[in-house]
Every structure is written in C-alpha cells, then in structure tokens.
Amino acid sequence: MTGPAEWRQALTDLSGKTAIVTGGARGQGAAEVRLLAECGARVLICDVLDQDGAALAANLGEAARFLRLDVTSAEGWADAIRTCRDWTGRLDVLVNNAGIINRTLIADTTPEAWRRLLDVNLTGAFLGIQAAAPLMAEGGGGAIINISSNSAFSGHADPAYTASKWGLRGLTRSAAMEYAAQNIRVNAVCPGLIVTDLNRASPHLQPMIDLTPARRSGEAEEVAQLVLYLASPAARFVTGEDFLIDGGFIAGAAYRHVAVRTGLLPE
C-alpha cells in the first residue's frame, strides 16, 4: 500500500471478511456491528438480548446474523464458531465487547457478584479467543479486539469491574504473543465515558464530563471507528497494545482540574 487510495481501502474495506461482535445487540456493540457491516464485513451479532439482536440483524439484512450467546459458556462459543464456519467458512475479526458492571464497593460486593462479573467481562473474552483462534488461523490470520476501559489504568469505585478491565489488558498482551506466529493480532480498546441509551440519564455523567479535558463525553460511533481501524489491514503491524479513547481523562484529568482551579490553565 503506497498511495492514498490504497490506504483508504485498507482502512475501510472489509469485503469478504467475517466478524463476531459480542454484546452487539445495542449500545456501543451495535455501533461496532453497524460500522463493520457498512464496510463490507459479514457480522455475527452475539448477545443475550434476543429481541434487540434479532432486530439489528434484520435491519442489516444479509450482512448480519444474530446468535444468542452467553459468553461464559464454552459450548455457546463453539456454536458461534460453527455458525461462522457454516455461514461464510471463515472468521477474521472478533470483538470481545460483552460486559456488565456492578457499581458496588468491596464491602458491598458479594462473592457471587464478583465471580459473575469476572466470568462475563474477563473469562468470556478468554473463551472467545480460545474458540476463535483456530478458525482465524485457518484463514491466514485475523484481528481480535478486546473492549477494556480507562478504568484499567486507575482505581475505579467498582472493584470487580476494574479488576476485570485490568485483566483484559494482561490477557490481550499474552494472547498477542501466543498467536503472533499465526498472524492473529490482539489489541485492547479502553474507552472512557461513552454515552449510550443505557447511561444517558446517569447522575455521574456531568461530573465526569467536567473532569474530562475534552469537556465532553464520547460517542459509541467513535469507539467503533477505532475498532474498525484495529480490525483493518491498515493496522497489520499493531498488536499487543492498549488504545485509550477517553478525551484525555487518564492523561491527567486530575492535574488539569487543579491547574484550572488555581489559574494555571483556562477553563
């Protein structure tokens, strides 16, 4: 790829590719599904939200199918891989987007709730990588994108969620090393505050926006654009990395807040 036309094609043309997006029925996952499909990929939407997932697949027509998948089930993952093999014969992109949140402190988190969150957020991604890698390798390689969080760089007031997202960063790097010889790239996307219909009315949004240097929240489509880049041939030399997309929050939101309050920086 030597010219602008070739680079544009590498960034936006996923024709002939097949992708799985977990947690793809709505919100950020649905934005990822739509963009990958718009760029030519066939997308298997995996979720436990049957109605939303089926509706999205119907809206996208032949570009998408919906499969109910509990990401904590190895048998469910085997079914997803069989579906891809029967549908298109290949798998090129896996987006481990499925996740849940507790919003409880250590003192208030039950062992059952702790285990359930780590099962979905971390073990689910592990099972997905384990199941997807052989079919990817058969096709000559692929891209795995784990959706972590900027909470994976700090101490968020939800210890189970934070631990799961830190764990995804480690899983990402280990997987990138293990599967490099099979031409499978593995990266992590770490969003900050992303507003969807699920959290649009949350009381913590405005305080977070006030601290974010970009002075706004992110949009699901912006995360999807980063996922598209990492899934595309344009990112063929990128693996084992964490990509923050949080408006500068982790870069120094607290220091900037102090600098603004003391007059060193403008509002």
Image (spheres, rainbow, N blue to C red):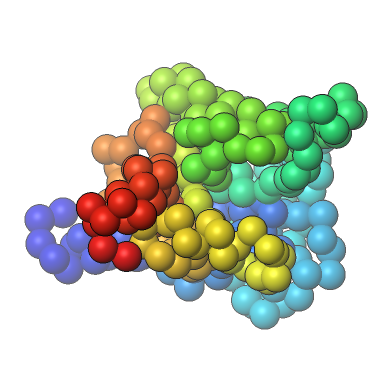
Residue 116: percent from the left, percent from the top? 83, 34
The residue at 56%/59% (across/down) is 207
Residue 209 appearing in the image: yes
Residue found at the far front of this picture: 262
Q: Which residue appears at 58% of the width and 26% of the height? A: 167
Location of the C terminus (image quadrant)? bottom left
Q: Position of residue 199 (x, y in %)?
A: 68, 64
Q: Where in the figure is residue 217, as x and y percent of width and height? A: 49, 64
- Relative depth, front residue between 219 and 256: 256
Q: Nearer the viewer, residue 118 or 181?
A: 118
User: Vertically, is 43 above or below 145?
Assistant: below
How many badges with numbers are in the image?
Answer: 0
Residue found 57% across the figure and 32% down from its top: 155
Q: Is residue 14 above or below residue 257?
A: below
Query: On the picture, is 201 further left or further right than 264?
Result: right
**Residue 210, horizontal then vertical, whole percent:** 47, 61
Q: Which corner quadrant holds the N terminus?
A: bottom left
Q: Is residue 74 left or right of residue 253?
A: right
Res. 125 in view: no
